[in-house]
Image (tube, rainbow, N blue to C red):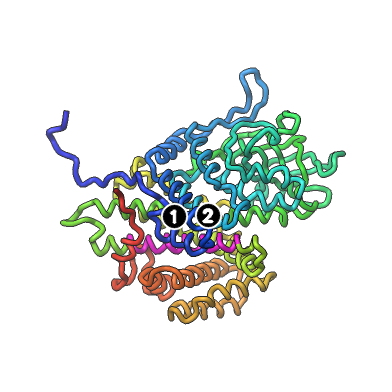
Amino acid sequence: MASRTHTVTNQPPPLVGYDVFGADRALSEAVERHLDPELLPGALTELSELGRAAGSAQAQEWGAQANENPPKLRTHDRFGHRIDEVEFHPAWHRLLGHAVSAGLTGAWTRPGGHVRRAAGFLTWTQAEAGHGCPLSMTHAAVPALRAQPDLAAEWEPLLTSRVYDEGLRPAGEKAGALFGMGMTEKQGGSDVRANTTRAVPLAEDGAFELTGHKWFCSAPMSDGFLVLGQAPGGLSCFLVPRVLADGERNVFAIQRLKDKLGNRSNASSEVEFDGTWARLVGEEGRGVRTIIEMVSATRLDCALGSAALMRQAVAQAIHHATYREAFGGVLVDKPLMRNVLADLALESEAATTLALRLAAACDAAGAGDERERALLRLAVPVAKYWVTKRCTPVVAEALECLGGNGYVEESGLPRLLRESPLNSLWEGSGNVQALDVLRALQREPGALDAFLGELGAARGADHRLDAAVKQLFQELADLEGVEARARRLVERMALVLQGSLLVRFAPSEVADAFCASRLGGDWGTALGTLPHTAPTGAIVERAGVALG
């Protein structure tokens, strides 16, 4: 029976039943720009299918269920035997299975794989971000394992497989596998050289016994893990399988699951090693150099994940404002609201454009382009630092566009907000990224040459960009007190890199507004303070989602 007190009106329809990829013009244009034309038709078909799945009511329900029913740790079975298993809600397995079948761990096995996989990762994780963690680590483990060809031959086909084969069994019995990583320890955190896990050689060539702990080990139900330990020859990288070849469980004692701010669907754990069997990966004593390939790939995924969160938040904000009426008209037509939405859209497009450019560099570097490889050495920590830092203010402002409705769990925005700081913390916090940039500047001049070459491709296109690049040159020439101002330097590098890409590839209204605000100083200290002359209507229209 309908209520006689009022009729519900002026509520936007749910943002559901749309192509997440196809509706994102910045993303789809980046794919068209960076992929070989021969690969494009197939890639666009695959990504549109994934986009429709990500925008479906089913995927959105899976995301909600996976977060409302977080994983549970089972240390022992009913008889008291140690099992160290983590139970996930069926929705988690459905999300992960769809992602694996879409090739989101298989960038290394096909032409243009990094661009295709990056676009898919950015698209699919908008449905739910937590399961992106094992996807990212599995994808990123491949280059590290290649330091040990026999291990790569055994594991790479499983890691790049499109079969999600859940359950703990020997790798040889599985059609697909997932990988995790354990680097940090209680006493050291990001200072991994302070690790105390001991690695003692066994009689079998390349085999070691580990004793120690890992303070953060995500997705502990993965089939294998790359970890660091102190071997006789120094800090080294090891592969720890959950199940040994004979079917016996490896020693992998899960102490507890972390109670986290967000990322609730994903299990992050503390684990103990006590006589744990492991295989050496790469050279003994060169563990950081071996695992850094994995770290670099996961850092790019942090930027992609943040770009995905921003894009979904901006899409929700514009969608709400398009349908919601207030003060005599729809919100999207109000000049001040349009300024806010346009400012949000600029951040989202700049993040997406930068992340896909770096994915294209990964493809080129894999094909032997050393200049692109050098660019990645600087641009990845720069992007990881800045894009992940911008995520939280963007999501918070987008939530405010919905008003009180955005503060309610059913809107989905609170989950995005809780997730938003995570990528800035994972794989090295902001300070770690800034210091890594300084290290690259000091030790690898080719990286700076490649970075400046990328900026040079936009020389003369915008006077504000040219002035900002000139200022960057001055800052790079003055290394006095550089560590204390490293964040300012990296921020400037990120902004000029984003500006150079938008000037080259984005519509003029987007590039002009970005350069005027981020580089030209015609901007306030909060989002929604673009110059009053900015073409906010065109920017918002470009970033919106059309339903039906």
Within-10-Å neighbours for mark 1: few <14, some 14–19, many 20+: many
**Residue 390: horizontal and vertical position, in percent?**
46, 59
Instruction: Kindly report which numbered mark, 2 or 1, lies closer to the viewer in this rendering.
Output: 2
> Which quadrant of the figure has residue 322?
bottom left
Q: In this view, does 233 lie above or below 5?
A: below
Within-10-Å neighbours for mark 2: few <14, some 14–19, many 20+: many
Residue situated in front as seen by the camera: 424 or 341: 341
Residue located farthest toward the left when viewing the structure as drawn: 4
Q: Which residue is drawn at 41% across and 76% down?
A: 520
Give amino acid for label 2: Arg
Q: Can residue 424 be seen in this view?
A: no
Q: Main secondary structure of the magenta part?
A: helix
Q: Give the range drawn in magenta.
A: 341-363
Q: Residue at x 57, y 56 (%)?
A: 114
Say left or right for 6 vs 67.
left
**Residue 499: horizontal and vertical position, in percent?**
46, 71
In space, the residues marked 2 and 1 are separated at their CA atoms by 26 Å
Say left or right for 173 vs 1.
right
As drawn, the label of residue 284 is none
**Residue 316: horizontal and vertical position, in percent?**
34, 51
Q: State the residue position of label 2.
A: 116
Give amino acid for label 1: Thr
Q: Is residue 535 above or below residue 340?
A: below
Q: In this view, does 48 lie above or below 434?
A: above
**Residue 410: horizontal and vertical position, in percent?**
34, 40
Q: State the residue position of label 1.
A: 392
> Which quadrant of the figure has residue 54?
top left
